[in-house]
Image (tube, helix red, strand yellow):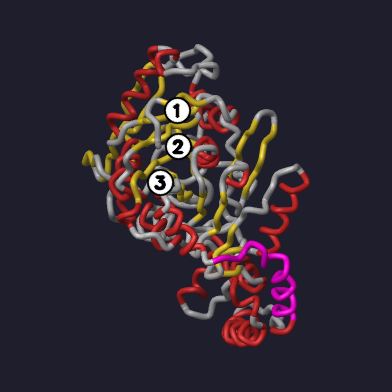
Amino acid sequence: MPALVLLGAQWGDEGKGKATDLLGGSVDYVVRYQGGNNAGHTVVVGDQKYALHLLPSGILSPTCTPVIGNGVVVDPSVLLSELSGLNERGVDTSKLLISGNAHIITPYNVTVDKVTERFLGKRKIGTTGRGIGPTYADKINRVGIRVQDLYDESILTQKVEAALDVKNQILTKLYNRRAIAVDQVVEELVGYAEKLAPYVADTVLVLNQALEDDKVVLFEGGQGTLLDIDHGTYPFVTSSNPTAGGACTGAGVGPTKISRVIGILKAYTTRVGAGPFPTELFDEDGDALRRIGGERGVTTGRDRRCGWFDAVIARYATRVNGLTDFFLTKLDVLTGWEQIPVCVAYEIDGKRVEELPYSQSDFHHAKPVYETLPGWSEDITKAKSFSDLPKNAQNYVKALEEMSGAPISAIGVGPGRDETIEINSFL
C-alpha cells in the first residue's frame, strides 16, 4: 500500500506543487485533503507555468487521477474557473474526482470573512478573505453545506436558512450590512450542480480500493505545518490540519496505510500574513531573497516575508508529522551569498531554547541564535547529482539535514520540472 503524504514543513509556499508534480508521473492518485483556494501551487512544465489554487497538482499529469477530498472546502465558482482555464490550455481535467462530503464555500461565508477581518482592524489574523475560516466554522457548527446537498434543493434550502438565521443577525446588527436572501444563495448554488456532477464521487471508497489494489496514492497538503489549526502559530493559522494526521481525516484513509511522509522545506524561510516569524529579515538580504526567489503568493498576490533557514521549525515539523524525508527547495536562490546564517536555536528571556516553545508569548519573543555557513557563487541550476553541487552547497545541505532530523532525499536547484536532484527515491 504505497501511500505517501507530502506537506509543507514551514509556513507554506515551500514549493509543494513542484514536488507533487515531480512524483505525478509515478503515482496513480493525487489527493488534496484540506484547505481551499487560500493556498496555491506554481508548477513549471517545460516553458509553461501553471498556477493552481484549488486543484491537486496531479491534474497536470495525464496518467494521474486528481482528487479533492472530504476535508477540502470548495468554492464552486473558483473550481469551475480553474478547470476552464486548464481546459483552454489543453489540459485534460476529466479525471478529477470531488468528494460529495466536501463542504461548499457559500457567498455568505466570503462576506462574513471579509467584514469580520475588516472589523478586527489591528487585531486581524491575515485571512485571505475567501471564506475558508467561516466555512470550516459552519462545518464544526453543523450548519455547513456539502457538495452532495446541491443535488437536493429542499435540504439545501433548509440548510441555507439555518445558516443565515444567525449570520444575517450578525451582518445587520453588528456590521450594519444588508441581510442575505436565502433564495438568492440557493439559486446560485443549484446553478453549479449540473456542472460539478461529472466529478462528484465517493472518494473514500475510491481511494481505499485503490490502495487495496496496490495503486500509488499521494496525499497533498496545502499551506504548511506552522499554519496547522492545532499545531501552528495559533491564532495566526489556517482553519484546517495541513499536518500528516489531516491526510487521514481529510481523505478517509486510516493511518496504518500511510507508508511515507515527505516534508517540503525551503532552503530559507518565508511567511505570508500576520504572526510571529523569528528569522524574518527587514534588510537588503530580505529584499534580495524576496526578489530572487520570486516570493509573492500564488493565490494572494501578497509579498512573502522572508528570513533565513530556521532549524528549530524544521525539527518541530519532523516531530509532529513523523517525517521520513525532506524535499529541499530553492537552494539556487541562495547562490551568491558569501556567508549564510542558519537559525539553530532561540534566545528567550536570556535562555537558549533548541525546541519550539509551546507558549505563544515565548515564541513571539524568541530571538534567533545563528550559526553562519560559507556560501557559494557557482550556478547550480544545471546540477544533476549531489556531487555536481559546489562543496559549500553540499555542506549547507548536509548541515540542514543534520539539524532538521530527517534525510534530505531531493533538492530543488531551479524552478523547472527537471531542475531537481534526486538523492533517494520517494517510491
Above or below, 413 relative to 326: above
Point out which mark residue 4 bears: 3
Q: Is residue 6 left or right of residue 30?
A: left
Q: Which residue is mark 1?
A: 411
Q: Which amino acid type is marked by label 3? A: Leu
Residue 408 in which image quadrant: top left
Give the main secondary structure, helix, strand or loop, of the magenta stretch.
helix
Q: Is residue 26 visible?
A: yes
Mark 2 or mark 1: whose residue is earlier in sequence:
2
| Callout in the foreground (2, 1) | 1
Is the C-beta separation of discs 3 and 2 under 8 Å?
no
Can you tell which mark lies on residue 23? none
Q: Nearer the viewer, residue 48 or 37?
A: 48
- Which image quadrant is residue 233 in? bottom left
Image quadrant where one finds the C terminus: top left
* Residue position marked by numbered label 2 in the rendering: 269
Q: In this picture, is 203 found above or below 176?
A: above
Of discs 1 and 3, which sits in the foreground? 3
Measured as percent of width and height from the top left, residue 316 is found at: 31, 45
How far apart, in angstroms, are the residues tagged by discs 3 and 2?
24 Å
Residue range corresponding to the magenta coloring: 184-201
